[in-house]
Image (tube, rainbow, N blue to C red):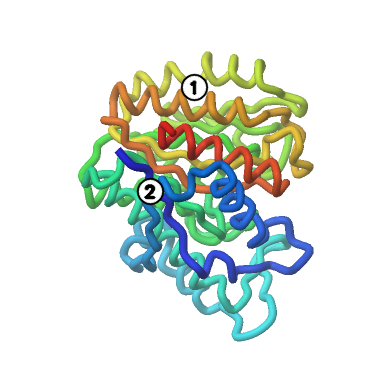
Amino acid sequence: MHTAYISHPSFLLHSMGDWHPESPERLRAIEDRLHAARLFDYLTHLEAPSVQRSQLLRVHDAAYIDFVEASSPSEGLRALDPDTSMNPHTLEAARHAAGGAVMAVDRVMRGEVGNAFVACRPPGHHATRNRAMGFCFFNNVAVAVAHALEAHGLARVAIVDFDVHHGNGSEDIFKDDPRVMLCSTFQHPFYPFCGADTARDNIVNVPLPAGTAGDAYREAFSAKIMPHLEAHRPQMLFCSAGFDGHREDEMAQFGLVEADYVWITEQVMGVAARHAEGRIVSLLEGGYDLSALGRSATMHIKTLAAL
Ligand SMILES: [Zn+2]
């Protein structure tokens, strides 16, 4: 079974300023590494469609969608948050990022590909039901999850969010939906400064201190996440795939390396094989050191593709 690699030209046009770490260069770094590793041509390349408003409305308030649309500038940048701005291409990129998430679910559910990686910008896991923040506008993984539930009738799914930041937007959207289990590992205390004391059966938050490296990370993941994932028996798995926990990434202070991302991917694939017929949709979130991001995302995709 093939792995889909879903992208769209607009993902390279969304920019929040030359200084901003969430840059178009991130996607170029991933694709450069996929080429260097001779993996690029073995993936099923798909162009992300634009999301439908009805698909966004499953996870975002109508007034918020209207606000993002109305905020789209005709030139320059418009800030929705101190570190989250729109340029004239951002709205199109955000629509295609969420649309790529929907496409990934459809292709995997139909069995056309075994799993899928959406190389999307802007990322999504900080976007709440009614707020843009942390470089995110529409919550792509939430849009994908809601599509799997509502359009494909799944009863149980799980998100594994291994970005170094807490997936607060995904928690906000699904905290009262027992069909969705969110498992999020994150540096704490750290941006967005929440998630350490959430008390919900379907939200499995694992705050970890600065300096956490591979062994301690794997131990925490094995002890605190795997039992919950197995018990939930998800029919599809979703990765909020952030690579900003890499030891070379200066955005945060984790000490993960490529081998750790391979290991995490294998854990998710194991759960998917046991409960979900292998179905995994992975979406790019963070990762800001270009070399570490390119190497880590490539190893994640190589593992997904069993290449
Ligand atoms: Zn992050």
Residue 95: x percent and y percent? 45, 67
> What residue sits 41% from the left and 39% below the top?
238
Q: Nearer the viewer, residue 148 or 50?
A: 50
Residue 31: x percent and y percent? 56, 52
Amino acid at dot 1: Ile
Task: Identify the disc placed on residue 225.
Answer: 1
Q: Nearer the viewer, mark 1 or mark 2?
A: 2
Instruction: State the CA–CA distance, disc 1 to disc 2.
Output: 26 Å
> What residue sits 35% from the left and 34% below the top?
178
Q: Residues within 10 Å of mark 2 (few under 14, many from 20)?
A: many
Q: Which residue does the numbered mark 2 point to in the structure image?
A: 4
Amino acid at dot 2: Ala
Regarding residue 182, the answer to whether it shows in the image is no
Q: Is mark 2 within 8 Å of ligand 1?
A: no
> What residue sits 37% from the left and 66% below the top?
49
Relative height, residue 176 to residue 259 (above, below): below
Residue 200: x percent and y percent? 46, 30
